[in-house]
Amino acid sequence: MCTGFPYYPRWRIDDRDRGRIFRRDARNGVKILRSYLYVPRRVTTLRRIVHEASFVASSCLRAMAGARPDVLVTVSPPLGLALTSILLSRAWRRPYVYHVPDLQPDAAVDLGMLPKGPMVRLLYRLERLAYRNAALVSTLTPAMRARIVSKGISAERVTLFPDWCETELFELPLEGGGREARSRFGLDGRFLVVHVGNMGVKQGLDVVLDAAERTRSHPDILYLLVGDGAVRQPLVDGVARRGLDNVRILPLQPLPIFRELLSAIDVTLVTQQRVVADIVFPSKMLTLLAAGRPVVASVSPGSEVARVVTEARAGLVVPPEDPDALAEAVLKLRDEERRRSMSVRGREYARAHWDREKILSDMERELHRLVARGGTSPSAPVSAPDETSGDLQMARDAR
């Protein structure tokens, strides 16, 4: 694996990696070749472009110094890795699989992060170049697959590589857990409504602060935001400015503490801006359902998140950017019996759709098939994807 130094979601490189250009690691028998990338203190559009470009350049050099593989699997974004993939594929005469867990150009336009113009046109050209030269394009969900096919890519060349649940999550207690976490963070006696993970533009987390204002008359309810990201500080400032004593923001937690905290949660939140529908699928959905946590999803009704929550019957779906609806859903889920049923159904759904062994076996078989037939022609047919598959966040450490 060729990747960068860990920095996400804090947007900060560890002290041990500062000043380094390369580092070699190993995990579970896999070589990890890390290379330099510029990480800005404050993320802007221009700095993000430099950030991604620095990794594209350094990782290409790092990969070229390694052994020739049988097949490349590129995880994008960064979208610029398309150039690396094409260069290495031709130099090595090896096929590449282009895996897309985030439709970056669509997200940038839909969220208003980039105005339509020369830069956006360049990104879309690069995207088309990546798809058309890939032996196989993979993505997370049927909706994302349909979006890629709509860009003129043959349906036979676009498949699903689903994600899988960590098996330890299924061992967490559905009820009565998390006592240590509640004591550690002073949460005893509170009804915990928790958002975990990245705090970015896509999440639209202001709706949580608005909902907290509307439920101030219920002093036992505490909204907890756990994680980091580009909008964390504005959220901290917003909580202080509004005087929201029913909202707390915690930093990223070590894995054992995070799992203990998961067991303590009464209701989890998944929020997205209205324009986010079929361009992303948050990997935390797998974590929350496998852990048996009821979900309130403040998302577009046509999104993949809404489909999964509804199909699993593991929570409530409310309109995005609607704090009144979000607050009402939280109050509804104070019903303990209702939450218990959702917890059981969510975990059952996760077991049925995101089984680690099945998903990895299917993925391995697809890669073997690609290599066996030569895989050098992007027009070569591939097996039809399983439309019932779940979702993938591949190589989490590589993004």
Image (cartoon, helix red, strand yellow):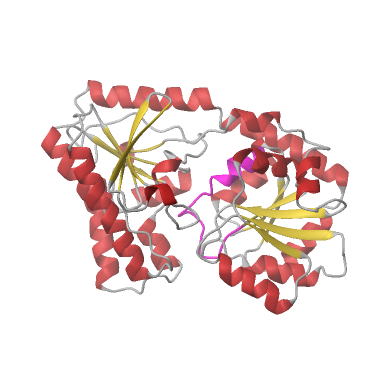
Q: Where in the figure is residue 292, as x and y percent of width and height?
A: 71, 38
Describe residue 140's horizontal placement relative to residue 312 as left or right. left
Describe residue 61's horizontal placement relative to residue 240 as left or right. left
Instruction: Decide: is 288 above or below 220.
Output: above
Q: Residue at x 37, y 22 (%)?
A: 365
Residue 238 in view (yes/no): yes
Q: Nearer the viewer, residue 180 or 235?
A: 180
Q: Residue at x 24, y 72 (%)?
A: 118
Please state the total of marks drawn on the protein image.
Answer: 0
Describe residue 192's horizontal placement relative to residue 289 as left or right. right
Q: Nearer the viewer, residue 197 or 298?
A: 197
In the rendered image, the residue lying farthest to the left is 91
In the rendered image, the residue lying farthest to the bottom is 241
Q: Where in the figure is residue 27, as x and y percent of width and height?
A: 42, 29
User: What quarter of the picture does the N terminus occupy?
Assistant: top left
Dominant secondary structure, magenta: loop
Q: Which residues are magenta?
A: 271-289
Q: Is residue 178 magenta?
A: no
Q: Where in the figure is residue 367, as x and y percent of width and height?
A: 32, 27
Q: Where in the figure is residue 272, as x and y percent of width and height?
A: 57, 60
Instruction: Decide: is 139 above or below 196.
Output: above
Describe residue 171's horizontal placement relative to residue 179 as left or right. left
Q: Nearer the viewer, residue 398 or 361?
A: 398
Specify the quadrant of the image occupied by residue 219: bottom right
Residue 85 in view (yes/no): no
Q: Is residue 283 magenta?
A: yes
Q: Residue at x 41, y 70 (%)?
A: 113
